[in-house]
Amino acid sequence: MIKFLRTTISILVCFSGIVISQNNISIQHLPSNTILILIDHEFHVRFGFKYPVTYQIGIPLNCKDLTAEKRYSSGMPWQTMRTVVPGEKFNGIEAARFDYDSGFAYVSVAFDDQSDSLFIKVSDVNAIPVPATFKKVTKYYDDRKAVVTITADDWCNGFDKWFNMLLPLFRSRELYVTCGIITDSTWCSKKTWANIQKQIDSSYIEIASHSRTHPFYPYNNFISEVIGSYDDIDKNLRLPEYSRNQNSQYVYVWIAPRSNYDIRVDTLLRQRSYLIPRRVSAHAETFSGWDDNTQHFTPTYITLELGNSSSGIGGIYDTSILNGTFNAVKSRGGIYHLLWHPQGIISYIDSPFVRNHLDYISKRNDIWYVNLGYLYLYHLVQLGSSRKVNSPTTAGEKLSAPSFSLDQNYPNPFNSSTMIHFHLSAASWVTISVFDVLGRKETTLLNQQMDSGDHDVLWDAQNTPSGVYYYRMSSEKYSQIKKMVVIK
């Protein structure tokens, strides 16, 4: 797991080393019609990338009977990938699909645990590679037209029985559900953890953090709720294949309890490499954006809630509204994000509106059915690969960085807390202090040896009066000062 350094209960330092804009994924066209995809090692370790990603590859027109092959190093033998045929139902697997009329191969493949390289080639019946050109990572898996993703909140002792009754409804229709767990031992007993593991092992389930105690905002203990919840999940569960590699498990989704949220949560999400926070206070059907400051996606929202609402935005019982909304999202090529709470639909488990709607949205060949975390994991690769396709002479290059840089704090102005980001090209002793306008030291946030890379410090200014302040960063060779404003 990504490790973090805690200097006090409110000052946190993270070693992220990842900035999406720095070409974390590069693509080369090699001799012998081979495509090489390279992923930054730390980027790879941080997020895993075990979910298959679809690469659209140009092939000559009027070909037939082609196969796609992969390997993870130049010394490995090539592995022939499964070829899917028109009309075949498949989802989230490694496979190759060929559109001979259009001259494209759609090769869906994941990265390997042990290698940052992925080689792909397309060969004819005589095992001779054909000319192949990387075009893009498709917006959705297998170039599907739209997405269905489903989240469910509040898995804990009180609702465990209902989850075990309801999840088979979705699994039988091959619908994937991302389930938010309330993880504190008083909320989630050993028996409940065991039942959660059984559901994971039965497939179609991704696990999300829904905090440790489902607190009202502001939390009494932000670290416990965000980081502690992640660690509870890691300790008690063996997560699905796409959420783990050889050495780590990944919890990609943070479901904000009661939908409340602030910069302190954002900073802690970065500590544990959560990928996407989910809230419920708005309608959404598109991807949320990547935030370079927090190093995760901005919060995503739901499309509809099924049954009784526990989210405050109103649940839907009407089959025509449910199906009509799905049709509208699909026609726009969007993401249909359905939410349910067990207490909101358990009374309607046999009601037509639940079963009819699930039947209506399921088992379609042109829809990508996916858990929420893997949806955004895929999108992260798409963003990283869209920055630049490198020629062999420039492949693997990284943007140069100064020896020392200090960013403007974010947010600024701010109410109670803010994040300060800085970069070191080499290990150094670093001091960061805060001063008022008269030059009096307010606090020292950091004073210790730091490794090279990107770092974050969170200043909790809850007890600091409104006003203008300055923060100074000093290393062994450099010093820089920036201004920030506290507004209460």
Image (tube, rainbow, N blue to C red):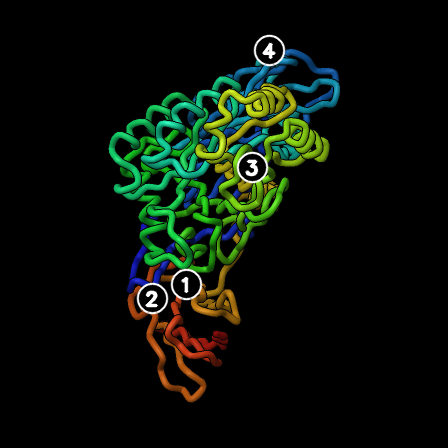
The vertical placement of 435 against 394, above or below, is below
Image vertical order of residue 223 relative to residue 146, above or below: below
Q: Is residue 161 above or below residue 443?
A: above
Q: Locate residue 365 relative to residue 419 in the image: left or right.
A: right
Kind of element beneath mark 1: strand
Q: Residues within 10 Å of mark 1 (few under 14, many from 20)?
A: many
Q: Position of residue 311 (x, y in %)?
A: 51, 44
Residue at the image position 38 percent from the left and 68 percent from the top: 460
Residue at which label 1 appears: 424
Answer whether residue 144 is visible to the viewer in this image: no
Question: Residue at label 3?
Answer: 305
Give the number of the mark in front: 3 or 2: 3
Reading the chain from its start, which is encountered first: label 2 or label 4? 4
Front residue (pair 327, 289):
327
Query: What's the residue type where badge 2 is placed?
Result: Ser
Image marks 2 and 4: residues in contact by CB distance under 8 Å: no
Q: Which residue is mark 4?
A: 126
Q: Which residue is mark 2?
A: 428
Q: Counting residues from the N terminus, which is met first, the one under dot 1 or under dot 3? A: 3
For the residue marked with disc 3, what is the amino acid? Glu
- The disc, 3 or 4, on the residue closer to the chain's N-terminal end is 4
Residue 484 sits above or below residue 170 on the image: below
> Mark 2 and 1 residues: CB-CB less than 8 Å, in contact?
yes
Task: Using the numbered discs, state the Cα–Cα distance from disc 1 to disc 3 in whole angstroms.
Answer: 45 Å
Q: Residue 33's x, y, as percent?
A: 61, 27
